[in-house]
Amino acid sequence: MNRLFHVSDLPHLAFAGVALAWHAMPIRHRLSRAARIARLLGDMWYTTSRADAAHTRRNMARGLGRSDTDALARDLFREVAYNKLLNDMLPKLHAHELSRLATPIGLEHIRSFVERGQSFILMGAHYGLNGYPVMRMLQHHNIPTLGVLGSDMPANASWAYRRVVYPIRNHVAETFDILTIDGLPQRRLLHAVRTGKALMLLGDALDEETASLQPPNVATIPFLDNTLRLKTGPVRLAQWLNLPIVPFFFRRRRIGYDMVMHAPIDITRSTPLDAPLRHFAALFSEYLRTDPAPWAHWRHETLERFLHPCSATPHTQTEGSHARRHSPA
């Protein structure tokens, strides 16, 4: 039986409260103030959620081989807070605010697909901006998209989260074309392809299914100085629908992000299932080496089930190399 309320609901209620007050802020200051508020809420969340903060630091130490995990973990909590604020504020964001929030880079890699009405797979990650704000950015840049996403309702969510926080957070989903991954109805996928929509999915889904699947449905991929267990579903979907895969990531700026599209990966029926995932993971690893904090999975309670060391000599860095400009504030 789920609880009526849990202390972990407090930050989410704070995010929802700020979102309700969003329309009262002067438009020219809203993004910068949201970043500062996210910094404060993230710090409060990091301080009060001790168990969550502790396993985040352990995951970062294990995955990165770094000693500055306190600064990195605090930065991650700020980043997650910023994402949740942006998600809750999406209905109020104006077009010029969206343009400030994320600058597209590499649109030439998908321009011909969009102009010809040809479908393709956009494969992103739980890194930087993610979730419904990504769908809004693609919509803002006139990229018709079907989001193939998992459920965002925690299994152990309290009554307060289900009845207060979730309706506010999920309300914006009604404005997007979303297909949850449960069952993957073939008819909707085929319709999206026929109408030239991009299929947006996340290549780093780490869930119970990923943990339980066996090859060829999963593959072990080099990742940073480790290996990462990833589903091969995106590649098999690309093979079935005869679509290219376009990796894309949201790279942080001082305020906002760069939405970076990479060159398409051509997929054929004979493409080894792990090859596109290796390419995706290699690109992703470079982002993480530059700015590791925004990967949401560092907070994953069972990350050790998916991320395993493959080298006895971990990659090490010092705290001074962590650029403060990456913080959302």
Image (cartoon, grey):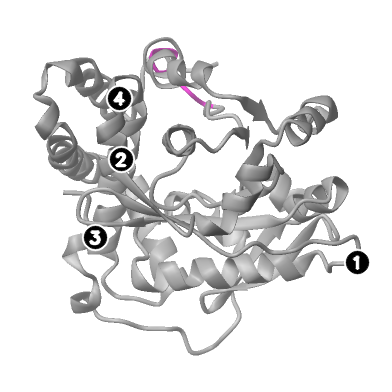
- Distance between the alpha carbons at the discs numbered 3 and 2: 19 Å
Q: Is residue 216 magenta?
A: no
The answer to which quarter of the image holds residue 293 is bottom left
Q: Is residue 157 magenta?
A: yes
Check whether the beta carbons of the residues at disc 3 and disc 2 lie within 8 A of each other: no
Please tell me which of labels 4 and 1 falls first in the chain. 4
Check whether the beta carbons of the residues at disc 1 and disc 3 lie within 8 A of each other: no
The answer to which quarter of the image holds residue 196 is top right
Q: Nearer the viewer, residue 105 or 210?
A: 105
Residue assigned mark 2: 99
Please tell me which of labels 1 and 2 falls first in the chain. 2
Q: What percent of the width, then of the height, locates residue 67? A: 29, 75
Residue assigned mark 4: 89
Please tell me which of labels 1 and 3 falls first in the chain. 1
Say which quadrant the N terminus sits in: top right
Residue at image x 39%, y 45%?
A: 129
Tell me the SS state at disc 3: helix
- Distance between the alpha carbons at the discs numbered 1 and 3: 40 Å
Residue assigned mark 1: 270
Tell me the SS state at disc 4: helix
Residue at image x 72%, y 56%?
A: 244
- Distance between the alpha carbons at the discs numbered 4 and 3: 22 Å
Q: Residues within 10 Å of mark 1 (few under 14, many from 20)?
A: few
Height in image: 145 above or below 275? above
Outermost residue to the top: 163
Q: What percent of the width, then of the height, locates residue 240? A: 87, 47
Outermost residue to the right: 270
Tell me the SS state at disc 2: helix
Q: Which residues are magenta?
A: 156-161
- Distance between the alpha carbons at the discs numbered 1 and 2: 40 Å
Residue assigned mark 3: 326
